[in-house]
Image (cartoon, rainbow, N blue to C red):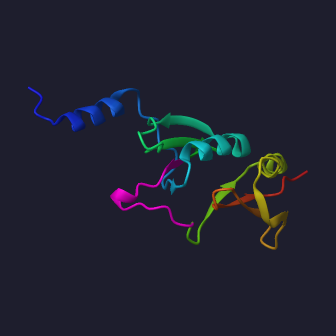
């Protein structure tokens, strides 16, 4: 006999609606952004993200959870939920880094063409990587790096 309250049963149904996607990587960034659905759509265009899970939008137009795969890693995001202690705040001092084996110029071009702002140009750095930094429209900083390919 099920003794769980209806709200728990609904939550369990939502989780069991489909298989949970595998989390790719040991540490997964979880971003709270104003407009999680718009952010997911942006990351799909600008970073080649693939959305592998999304909880439906609630009656206030917010999305509790979106799971993306970007460059063989997971990034998760949601809208802010002030009533649960997660108000919208400007991003703190952090950068999400994409280490790329090849194609860094293509990644960079796609990101910039889709609206990322260059904050540090993509250039060969003293430590040996081609490296640059961008800011997305949600205020999140991203860095791209790649070891130059040997001819």
Q: Nearer the viewer, residue 38 or 124?
A: 38
Rendering coords of residue 46 (x, y %): 73, 45
Describe residue 145's horizontal placement relative to residue 76 as left or right: right
Kindly identify the residue that appears in the image at 52 percent across and 55 percent down: 31
Q: Closest to the observer: 137 or 101?
A: 137
The stretch drawn in magenta includes residue 89: yes
- Residue sitting at 68 percent across and 56 percent down? 137
Q: Is residue 29 at least partly visible in the picture?
A: no
User: Residue sitting at 16 percent across and 36 percent down?
Assistant: 5
Tell me: residue 49, above or below residue 134. Answer: above
Magenta range is 75-90
Residue 65 is inside the magenta segment = no
* Quarter the N terminus occupies: top left
Q: Position of residue 89 (x, y in %)?
A: 51, 66
Picture quadrant of residue 119: bottom right
- Compared to residue 70, the image places residue 26 above or below, namely below
State whether residue 12 appears in this view.
yes
Q: Where 5 sits versus 43, above or below?
A: above
Residue 74, above or below 52: below
Tell me if 46 is positioned left or right of 59 in this view: right
| Relative side of 81 to 41, left or right | left
- Percent position (x, y) of residue 144? 73, 58
The residue lying at 49 percent from left, 61 percent from top is 88
Q: Position of residue 38 (x, y in %)?
A: 61, 44
């Amino acid at each position: 006999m099920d003794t769980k309250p209806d709200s728990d049963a609904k939550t369990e149904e939502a989780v069991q609606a489909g298989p949970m996607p595998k989390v790719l990587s040991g540490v997964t960034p979880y971003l709270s952004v104003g407009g999680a659905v718009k952010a997911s759509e942006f990351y799909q265009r600008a970073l080649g993200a693939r959305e592998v899970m999304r909880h439906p939008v609630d009656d206030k137009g917010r999305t509790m959870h979106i799971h993306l795969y970007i460059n063989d890693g997971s990034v998760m995001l949601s809208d802010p939920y002030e009533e649960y202690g997660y108000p919208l705040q400007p991003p703190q001092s952090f950068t999400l880094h994409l280490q790329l084996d090849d194609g860094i110029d293509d990644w960079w071009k796609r990101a910039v063409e889709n609206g990322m702002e260059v904050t540090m140009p993509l250039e060969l750095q003293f430590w040996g990587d081609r490296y640059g930094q961008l800011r997305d429209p949600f205020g999140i900083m991203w860095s791209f790096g790649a070891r130059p390919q040997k001819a």
